[in-house]
Amino acid sequence: MLEMEVIHSTQQDMELIDILWKQDIDLGARREVFDYNHRQKEHELRRQRELEEEKREHLVQEQQKALLAQLQLDEETGEYIPCPPPSTPLQSAVTPLEATQNVSFTEQSGDAMSFDECLQLLAETFPVEETENTPVCLDTTAVSAPMMSPEQPVLPPAILSPLPTPQRITPDLEQAWMELLSLPELQQCLNMQMEDTLETTTYPLPNSPEVQNPNYSFYPMTDLTDGKTNSLNVCPAEFMNTFDGSVHSMAPADLHQIRAKSPQANANLTAESFCEIYYPDVILEESSGQHGLKENESNAVCDIPNKPLFTPLDFYSHSPGDAFDRGKQNLTVEMPDSDSGISSNTSPNACSPGKSLYGNDSYGYSDSDMEEMDDNPGSAESDYSEMFSLNFQPDDHQMAISVSAPLGQTLQQEKNPKQHRTDPAEESGQNSAPFTKDKQKKRSEIRLSRDEQRAKALKIPFTVDMIINLPVDDFNELMSKHELNEAQLALVRDIRRRGKNKVAAQNCRKRKMENIVGLESNLDSLKDEKERLLSEKSQNITNLKEMKQQLNSLYLEVFSMLRDEKGNSYSPSDYSLQQSTDGSVFLVPRIKKTFIKTEDNLFSPL
DNA sequence: CATGGTTGTCATGTG
DNA sequence: TACACATGACAACCA
């Protein structure tokens, strides 16, 4: 159903929606919003056409009354407030409240009029004044047209154009405008027309003219030529009218009363409330940042049509610069960082930042104490950096923070060490792919900085490198030159021991790795040797087998060449060839062989 | 959250 | 015996 209505919407309306949407898309508004409003508007338009003539007559009557009305000076505020027409006060005070945005969105009573229809009505009712003064409804050609008297014919709707030309409005016309705008039909119409865009933008609506400022720009969103004049004419409440039905439908007098009675309420109803809806996260920041603008209500919204104050881009771009937000960011960023930890309570000198507790002779905790501190949630980096930030950099500002704000103290004290600790190398190590050497270097640097911080804490007059890398004689000489207390000596010894042991462990692991690599290399070589020997063995077996075959062939060949006295060949199964020790070869019968052997055994003296 | 790699540190052994 | 070094073991950290 609604989709069909959208389809049947006129091309003009679609173009208007497109324009408005394009204007508001920068503010994060999505097209669906407008589509919905557009549907509502179309629905409203159809129903309004039915009652168009009635409303036109009614509007003419109201405007005639408005013309007769005189402006009244408010003695309290010194502002010109319109005298409420006899028949309109209740209407302007109650009916607009009823014609809230919700009503216009959901119910869309058929009393509302279309935007163009209202403009046409205005042109018909006040041909001359509108021609001269209405900056929005008439284009430049209409404005530059010759002055027309109220009796002149109705301005053709074709002349109506959204192009603005801000001009001043006479008090009479202003009163007439207010009366006209107080009409619920026109308000509904205008709201309906403008809500599509003003919901997400801060374009003002003209239904609450600023009495003290007779300049009106009823459709400043189209006022691209004179933003300042336009901006000065719009109060924040008018912006609220664009999305808050309870306010936007108020009569100007009512708005004025509200503004005079409760500026705070007015402020709450203005851009701040507007932003609370669309930018709830940044409303506080923005309200603080833009608060100065609200001193002048007109200025508070003056720039909105041309330069929206609450674009998301502005929010995010301004957020880093805002002190409050920056602090908030620090809160959110630093708090979860357990690495830096909050160790102000455990820090021995957190309460005595003026003088170091690690004096040359006063403080005597050993290295084990240091290690216990390392085990604390607050790492040694943070602890010692905290000491240094207080001992060696007694910044007044920091002191003030530490005294006034406990949380700020810890944060400040944590932030500095962390910033100090995160050197570029470490950051790069975290960002880039961590190679082993990089990580090693990183951790080594961390450890080194920890010992350095300890040394600084005890005010040891040597560098850690000296303590660790000096030869024994030089180190002893150096220690003898400086009179150090027990804590310092213990720390120096521990630093040296740890440094040496660290290097030794690194060398040990390096050797271990080298041994592993060497063993792996040996294993590979042994495997190769094994393969080679196996191959040689197989080759030897092959050769042996071949030689045996050759020998057997030769044996048979020799045997086949032997003949007895009768010329018969000897059978290999009956005879065999044997070689004596002197090299001579004998043919020996196999059976005789054993026999001969037995004979040899029997008769041979050997 | 579990897991494996890396590193620092300690305790102990060795020369 | 003191010292330096080596090494196994443990814990912390990190990906």
Image: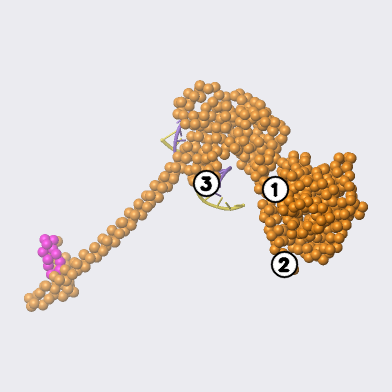
Chain colours: A orange, B yellow, C purple
Task: Please name which of the two marks, 2 or 1, marks the residue nearer to the observer.
Answer: 1
**Vertically, is C4 above or below A53?**
above
Chain at numbered mark 2: A
Q: What's the residue type where badge 1 is placed?
A: Thr
Residue at the outermost front position: A146
Image coords of residue A332 (percent x, y): 67, 44
Question: Given the image, on which type of amino acid does mark 2 rest?
Answer: His
Query: In terms of sequence position, does the residue under pointer 3 or pointer 2 come before the other?
Result: 2
3D distance between C-alphas at marks 3 and 2:
58 Å
Residue A152 in magenta? no
Q: Which residues are magenta?
A: A577-587
Residue denoted by label 1: A225
Task: Pick the residue in front: A443 or B4.
Answer: A443
Q: Where does residue A464 sit, x and y in percent of width and height?
A: 52, 31
Q: Pointer 2: what residue?
A: A8
For residue A264, side relative to residue A501 (left or right): right
| Residue located at (79% from left, 56% from top) | A123
Structural distance between the alpha carbons of marks 3 and 1: 52 Å
A257 to the left or right of A541: right
- Which residue does the numbered mark 3 point to in the structure image? A432
Mark 2 secondary-structure assignment: loop
Decide: few, some or many residues near mark 1? Use Cα within 10 Å; few <14, some 14-19, many ≥20. Answer: some
Residue A468 located left or right of residue A17? left
Q: CA distance from mark 2 to mark 1?
A: 34 Å
Chain for numbered disc 3 = A
